[in-house]
Image: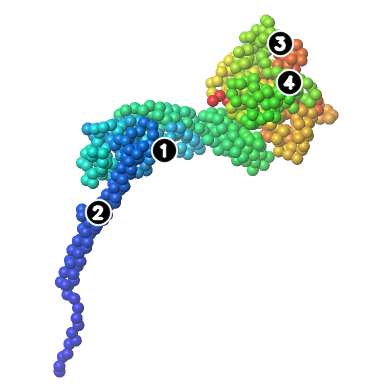
Amino acid sequence: MKNNKKMTSGITLIALVVTIIVLLILAGISIQMLTGDNGILTRAVDAKEMTDIAEIEEALKLEYLNLLTGKYTGDETATFENAINSYNTKNPTKPQITSESANGKIEIDKVELSSTNIQLGVDSEENANVKTVEVIVTPKQNTGMKHYVTISGKKYEVKDENGEIKIDRTPTNTTGTGITIQAEVADSTVATASVNGTTITITGKLVAGSTKLNVTVNGTPYNEIGTIVAKAILKPGGTAVATETDNYTDSNEKTATVPKGFTVSSEKGTTSGKTDETSIDSGLVIKKGSDATGWDEYVWIEVPRSIYTDPNYTTDLTANEQGKKEVTSATDYDGIYKVLNRYAYTYREGKAGQGRYWKDEWYDSSNKKATDSGANLSDTAGCGLTSENYTKQYQRMLKSVYENGGFWIGRYEASSNSTAPLSQKGKTPQANITCSNAQIQAAKVATSDTTNNENSKNYTSSLMFGIQWDLVCKFLEGSSEWRNNTEAEKIAYINSDSSRWGNYRPDSGSGSRKYTGSSTTYRRRNIYDFAGNVGEWTLEHATSKSNYPCSYRSGYFDGTGSDYPASYRNYSSYTDSSYDARRFSCLTLLK
């Protein structure tokens, strides 16, 4: 039997190996042709570099030609160095031409920063605040120096060959030291600085303040080359790390200045019985303390900065002390007072028709003013301050109101404490204290130096001046509870009859003193008990009675709201201790 085998064709293992080897050799050759020293890609990069060099060379020649033809005027002349300077100035984003001395070190003409005023936001929520600036170094362009342009990390020499500008096409082997930059912040508690190349990164430290940036280039110091200003920018719930102008902005873009250590309320009116405490229009609330010891709370009284240039308040309308000119200086105390007086003029006489246009002026325990013969200028038994310190505190207050656009007052009537009076809810209002002692206690809110009331924090505290009480009355006109009332009705609630929103005696029977913040009925713009409950000392001089120089405002729980509305002015002797000291937790900010 014949055995037939069918033959099939294929590739042997040896042939396969040979084929792979050949392919690898071809691939290696291809890669070498692409990436080798003389490869296609390398030659493409080189061609790009040569094109860049040619463009720079042409630009330099054009600058030189412009100088020769007199296109530029001034001190510039047609020199190689001036052509380089002109090129560098006009082409800041292109490779710059640098100059080196014989030892390869760049000679510096001047050092500048891309920004000399570096603003840092300081976020009390501890978010990082970082800014970067560029160091701009202008090298000297002296005859005899060598000039280079760096392309793709390679240095090419720029030459002047008998009036013709050329750039070598072969990189130089020089190893110059180039530019070395160091930077430090003068006050390292405000910010720190780090350097990467010519970029300085400045990082804030959550501390508001102002300091200088010092830069060293190639060993030469350039001190105070820039100013760093860090501001505290607060959000609801944030705590101020420093007192700085306008460190809080509410949702309506209105601003307030929060003193260091105080926390902005985060209550937006979503809690039962609460109103929005984050808005200036509603009554911005700040607080300090703890859940264990209680929170001292204060409300911002807005006094718009616009009033100092508003003709409605800077024009002399009557013979009384009105503003007569625009106020542009924080130390124009007389001008500031006159504008404030005009702004709150509705309440300057006290209750409507009272006619008690009293002044904020010092007086001693004999009811003598500072200008009176025989006045004891060091006497504190009258209003609690010497004449000198009264003037100092009064001027501080006016300056602060002008610069900050408002001031803070206690949210609640003051209550006693072993160290300093409190502004807390649910306390017994402090009473049975003389005006002078009330002022001495008032100073303790900010400092233990009760005689001079000098600052030991970043604000001072005192009884309110008369003009401040009137400014609060003006502020309360905007209460949301009265949004449907006419302007005349709002004013009447404050200077004619405050029965609807104060703790006064009922129509029959007698009244009783309430705890602080006892009812939302007595709340307007987040301030409690401004009308009624207890009378309140101020630093105003009551001039209606010779033996009663001390001024107190508003009414008390056993009077009526029509007899003693919120704006009411009354007088008492310097030995009388019948009235409360409530609003002495008025804070004057110091910047």
Q: Dot 2: what SS? A: helix
Spot the residue most to the front. 69
Residue 370: x, y in percent? Answer: 66, 10
- Which residue bears the numbered disc 2? 42
Which mark is first along the chain, 2 or 4?
Answer: 2
Which mark is first along the chain, 1 or 4?
Answer: 1
- Which residue bears the numbered disc 4? 320
| 154 displayed left or right of 408 | left
Q: CA distance from mark 4 to mark 3?
A: 23 Å
- The label nearer to you, 2 versus 3, is 2
Q: Looking at the image, how many numbered discs can be counted on the residues?
A: 4
Disc 1: CA contacts within 10 A as few (<14), some (14-19) or many (>=20):
some
Displayed quadrant of residue 410: top right
Residue 417: x, y in percent? Answer: 62, 23
Displayed quadrant of residue 223: top left
Q: CA distance from mark 4 to mark 1?
A: 55 Å
Q: Dot 3: what SS? A: loop
Residue type at mark 2 is Thr
- Which residue bears the numbered disc 1? 132
Q: CA distance from mark 2 to mark 1?
A: 36 Å
Residue type at mark 4 is Asn
Quadrant location of the N terminus in the rendered image: bottom left
- Which residue bears the numbered disc 3? 367
Residue type at mark 1 is Thr
- The label nearer to you, 3 versus 1, is 1
Q: CA distance from mark 3 to mark 1?
A: 61 Å
